Image (cartoon, rainbow, N blue to C red):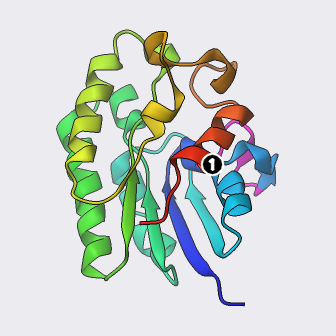
């Protein structure tokens, strides 16, 4: 049976940190949103090209490798740009350029917005929301990662059950929510 190949390109949220280490290709697969999306969509084959700590310029450098042989691209990134003091503008520009590259190849593409960041709250809440506005304006389908994990009782933060103890990444339950509730094929 032919399966649709979905390339997932991004940072630690795509990788599945802290549960999965892309460099070692080892860890708990339940700590990756793609695991849960694959269970819900058995006709899809997910290829994970997420690497912890990467900014959008570093993600862009891996674009060609990630999309080789893919039928669809899911693009995620931007929080490390903010965490490393880079501008919202540069992150948005890099994401837009990758979207343009995918569209030029005829590759359907969707983008994920930036998650709430408990360790960065409250200082990073406004920059995250501003970057997410830019991501929503890219003109391609949006996977609503932010809203899927935001605590309705604590705006700008992940709900405790959906956040890993590190305060930076989703818990396994959070990754399950992303894969089951936020993912959709563009």
Residue stretch rendered in magenta on the structure: 15-25
Would residue 68 be found to the left or right of residue 178 on screen? left
User: 158 above or below 60?
Assistant: above
Q: Residues within 10 Å of mark 1 (few under 14, many from 20)?
A: some
Quarter of the rendering occupied by the C terminus: bottom left
Q: Position of residue 28 (x, y in %)?
A: 82, 46
The residue singled out by tag 1 in the image is 180
Q: Position of residue 86 (x, y in %)?
A: 27, 33
Q: Which residue is depicted at the point 51% across and 16% down?
A: 118
Q: Residue 24 magenta-drawn?
A: yes
Question: Magenta stretch: dominant SS?
Answer: loop
The answer to whether residue 164 shows anywhere in this view is: no
Q: Which residue is depicted at the point 35% across and 18% down?
A: 124
Q: Position of residue 27 (x, y in %)?
A: 81, 47
Q: Position of residue 88 (x, y in %)?
A: 22, 35
Q: Which residue is depicted at the point 51% across and 15% down?
A: 119
Would residue 50 be found to the left or right of residue 96 on screen? right
């Amino acid at each position: 049976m032919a399966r649709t190949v979905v390339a997932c390109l991004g940072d630690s949220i795509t990788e599945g940190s802290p549960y999965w280490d892309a460099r070692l290709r080892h860890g708990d697969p339940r700590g990756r949103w793609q695991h849960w999306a694959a269970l819900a969509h058995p006709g899809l084959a997910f290829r994970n090209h997420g690497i912890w700590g990467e900014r959008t310029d570093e993600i862009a450098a891996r674009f060609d490798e990630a999309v080789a042989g893919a039928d669809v691209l899911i693009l995620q990134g931007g929080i490390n740009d903010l965490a490393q003091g880079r501008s919202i503008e540069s992150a948005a520009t890099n994401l837009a350029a990758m979207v343009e590259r995918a569209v030029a190849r005829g590759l359907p593409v969707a983008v994920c917005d930036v998650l709430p960041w408990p360790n960065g709250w409250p200082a990073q809440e406004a920059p995250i929301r501003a970057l997410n506005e830019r991501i929503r304006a890219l003109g391609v389908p949006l996977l609503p990662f932010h809203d899927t994990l935001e605590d309705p009782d604590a705006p700008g933060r992940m709900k405790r059950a959906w956040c890993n103890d590190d305060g930076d990444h989703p818990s396994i339950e959070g990754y399950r929510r992303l894969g089951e509730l936020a993912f959709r094929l563009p």
